[in-house]
Amino acid sequence: MISVPGARGFVAPAADGPDDAFLVTEVKEFAHLHPEQDGSLHLALPLDLAGDAIARGWAQSHMWAGVRLSPGFLMVYGPRDEAELEVVAGIVEASYRYALGQLR
């Protein structure tokens, strides 16, 4: 709903996490993947995990973080190999768990 053409939204319709866990609260979109030429993602994490992802060089704070969307709104870099894919998948899993209300 808010990304570039060709992006794929990750939604969790039954999720009951905090509003800050979602990019589009109305449809429970907690992340979206940009088209394959880019491969980056937007997602939300609790502030401590967002800060950790930034400090470790996996993400950067989005310009809308804390303004239009959650303070933990990030742009996560697209993985370049299998090892990086594993790390990025873990970040997406954390975002999903945040949406489910399992992380605060």
Image (cartoon, helix red, strand yellow):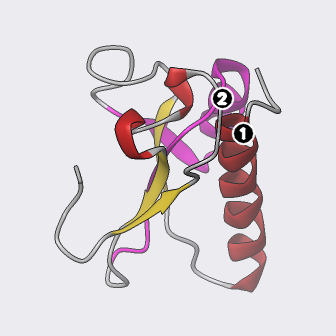
- Residue 97 percent coordinates (x, y): 76, 43
Residue at (37% x, 24% y) in the render = 65
Instruction: Specify the amino acid type for callout 2.
Output: Gly
Instruction: Specify the amino acid type for callout 1.
Output: Leu
Residue 30, compared with residue 63, is above or below; it is below
For the C terminus, the quadrant is: top right
Residue 53 lies in magenta, yes or no?
yes
- Residue 40 percent coordinates (x, y): 43, 64
The reply to whether callout 2 and callout 1 are in contact (CB within 8 Å) is: yes
Q: How many marks?
A: 2
In-image side of 98 versus 68 (left or right): right
Residue 92, compared with residue 74, is above or below; it is below
Residue lying at the far top in this picture: please name it.
Answer: 67
Residue lying at the far left in this picture: please name it.
Answer: 5
Residue 92 lies in magenta, yes or no?
no
Residue 58, compared with residue 33, is above or below; it is above
Say the numbered circle drawn on residue 17.
Answer: 2
Between 37 and 102, the one lying in front of the other is: 102
Range of residues picked out in magenta? 38-62
- Residue ID for mark 1: 100
Residue at (77% x, 58% y) in the render = 90
Residue at (31% x, 70% y) in the render = 7
Between 82 and 12, the one lying in front of the other is: 12
Residue at (69% x, 75% y) in the render = 85
Alpha-carbon distance for marks 2 and 1?
Answer: 5 Å
Mark 2 or mark 1: which comes first in sequence?
A: 2
In-image side of 8 versus 63 (left or right): right
Residue 36, compared with residue 88, is above or below; it is below
For the N terminus, the quadrant is: bottom left
